[in-house]
Image (cartoon, grey):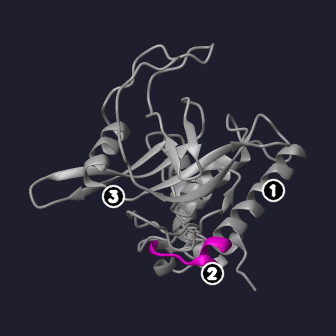
Amino acid sequence: MPTPLRAFRSPLGEDEDLNDNDDFSNTRNAASRSSRVKPKKTKIYSDFHVDLSGLVGINPAHRDDGNREVVNIVLMTFDALRRRLSQLVDAKELSTGLVKRADLKVGNICMTKGIRTNVTKRVGAVPGVEIGDIFFFRMELCIVGLHAQSMGGIDALHITGVREEETLAVSIVSSGEYDDEAEDGDVIIYTGQGGNFNKKDKHVSDQKLHRGNLALDRSSRTHNEIRVIRGIKDAVNPNSKIYVYDGLYKIQDSWVEKAKG
């Protein structure tokens, strides 16, 4: 049976002794007799790092490089935790503070507790993820290693070459917010990231050739493969999206133009 979470405790220091009750009593008595002696205040941290990946069947090797089974385990664990957290919030038994979205909270838990896979960032296909796989939350893309940016549309990788270090784009999420167009099933016109929005969903500044956009520009010259995830509006809930992994693409051309936004 899995070990209950309550069984995990932070390790004791070398100088700690739980059975030394006499010294503790003497310290309290000394503090009460003299006004000059102040009781020692100990800061207790409620959150400490505990690797929970072993409880769901993920070993260190699977975290670096996964497979189909490990990807399914990670996604099922994420969904189970998200559902349970949503139930507790709805029943008013748990308050998540300012974060009302259970998917973001659970995604952070999975990332910090080791319940993830394909941590090693790479160019090309991700082990265990197949074309056509559907993801219902952006955090799911992160915990399976498909797209490491929970908000940004472009994910990049720093590569140290023979002459200098360069940054290449490894994946993009085409969510449709930047007037992206799909000519057919094999070609997509992707508008880069950046340019702040105002309340009317219009750009108030031009995009700049830096960060993710610069990585895409370099990938257009190196012709490396880029993972494409398409964001599609959910027919049941128009305010939400689902994400479909569409496979590997290569940049064919790039240009600068003034968009209608």
Q: Residue at x 61, y 77 (%)?
A: 68
Tell me: residue 175, above or below residue 19.
above
Measure the alpha-carbon separation of dots 3 and 2. Answer: 34 Å
Tell me: residue 230, above or below residue 6.
above
Name the foreground residue: 89 vs 172: 172
Residue corresponding to mark 3:
224
For the question of whether residue 212 can be seen, the reply is: yes
Pointers 3 and 2 in contact (C-beta within 8 Å): no
Residue 42 position, x and y percent, is: 51, 51
**Amino acid type, label 2:** Gly
Residue 83: which disc?
A: 1
In the rendered image, which quarter is residue 206 located in?
top left
Say which element carries label 2. loop
Residue 92 position, x and y percent, is: 87, 43
**Amino acid type, label 1:** Arg
Residue corresponding to mark 2:
57
Name the foreground residue: 242 vs 121: 242
